[in-house]
Image: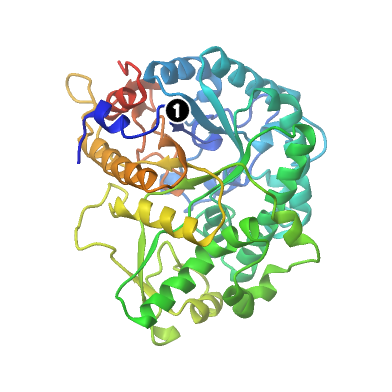
Amino acid sequence: MTQDAKALAARFAPDFTWGVATAAYQIEGATRTDGRGPSVWDAFANMPGRVYRGHNGDVACDHYNRWEADLDLIAELGVGAYRFSIAWPRILPQGRGAVNVAGLDFYDRLIDGLVARGIGVFPTLYHWDLPLALAGYGGWTDRDTADAFADYTTHVVRRLGDRIDALATFNEPWCSTYLGHWIGKHAPGERSIDAALAAVHVTNLAHGLGVQAARAERSDLPMGTVLNAQSIYPATDSADDAAAAERAFQFNNGVFFDPIFRGSYPDQVMAALGDRLQLHDGDLEVIHQPLDWWGFNYYFPATVKHAPSTAEAGGLTGVGAMGAYESDRDAAAAFLQLTSIPSSDSDLRTDIGWEIVPEGIGHLLHQVYARYDLPPCYVTENGACYNMGPGADGTVEDQPRIDYIAAHLEVLADAADAGIPLRGYFAWSLMDNYEWAEGYRMRFGIVHVDYDTQTRTVKRSGQWFARIAGGSGG
């Protein structure tokens, strides 16, 4: 593996997009400013016991007030594009109805600032911050939320669409549906497989309606979605383990890939759990919109083995039901009938405890391009949690993060050489930020944030990534 930035960058096409990524609730703060309404994450974070030490996003990285300096920082890194999310509660504080013009004004200024600096504009419409008012009606388990999302999309694209380079509908629907409604680790903190699968379908429906709404405003806007598809390996070459891996693929990946790219749900999922999806006639046609691109977020894989009985199924972190109510866990476990094991003999893990298996990013890409007729792909998130801070000289020495990113880029270069239509790579994340249920204790940034002073310090990984992207990174 080479860590020479120029040599590594040279393995990719000259027009390859190098970018950095963030999300609104994780960096913006200003949760009660300029008419923004509350989101489900505002409520969840302020419930005792939900988030590490009760941390919330009220201030975060104060990006709402420091956006110009943060855009200067992105320009300094020399990256070609910035992936960020738009906060639905800033645009429609009640989720639908009256538009908060001040919210649109903020993103208007932000996008103008990116354009002025020559940085590509890659927004995501939904990165988990559902307006709290909609949760009162059922949130993602209620079909009306899909219509509300389409209305929200219309307002955003009508005002901002002329300067957007590529627009994503959703970020990681696996998390907002399964982690939020089944495992309970993310907002709204529900633990019901029925609710989770209802949310899967309503989210998919919202994606299709959102694509239609965006294209009704701007037919030339490149549309996509971002999936944190699970890279799943069978533990052995046995037929039982291969079948377990296939069930895990269908349950975690197929419920999104199949309706979006094929216009159907996986047969095995439908046979076992399909009644919980609550399909209506015509839904699949709406979901199955042609896309111009799709995004893949990858951090670690899963390895699964067949469990002979439901009682032996478990350990399904990442691909199953840890923490769900027993009755619901049994319904899902009866279908999955598997358990997860370490993916590698190596004990290499990041500070958040995730395994380091660079090969998994290529494994998934080859797998999905063999299964589906997919448009070109951007790796929209990839990065590592290492919590080192500034040393005595003020520098942040985070060599493990450089090692992690370099190893994954090598695998991606191999995939591109093998014909995978890879168009860009966005490092997660631009800066340390609010890491959801982990609060502020886990740091993914290539830029360090001192949360007491809001001082930004480019880490060694940021300087190295700047050389990849062609910037100075000073």
| Residue 31 seen in this snapshot | yes
Q: Is residue 390 above or below residue 354?
A: above
Residue 149 appears in the picture as rendered: no
Of residues 51 and 16, the one drawn nearer to the viewer in this rendering: 16
- In depth, the one of 349 and 435 nearer the eye is 349
- Vertical position of residue 254 compared to residue 385: above or below: below
The residue under label 1 is: 15
Would you identify the image quadrant in which residue 277 lies?
Answer: bottom right
Identify the element where label 1 is drawn: loop
Residue 243 image point, x, y percent: 43, 78
Colour style of the rendered protein structure: rainbow
Say left or right for 349 vs 319.
Answer: left
Seen from this angle, which residue lies furthest top?
116
Q: Residue at x 68, y 61 (%)?
A: 263
Q: Indicate left or right for 88 with 302 as reference.
A: right
Q: Please tell me whether residue 215 is drawn above or below residue 453 in the rendered image.
A: below
Q: Position of residue 210 (x, y in %)?
A: 72, 44
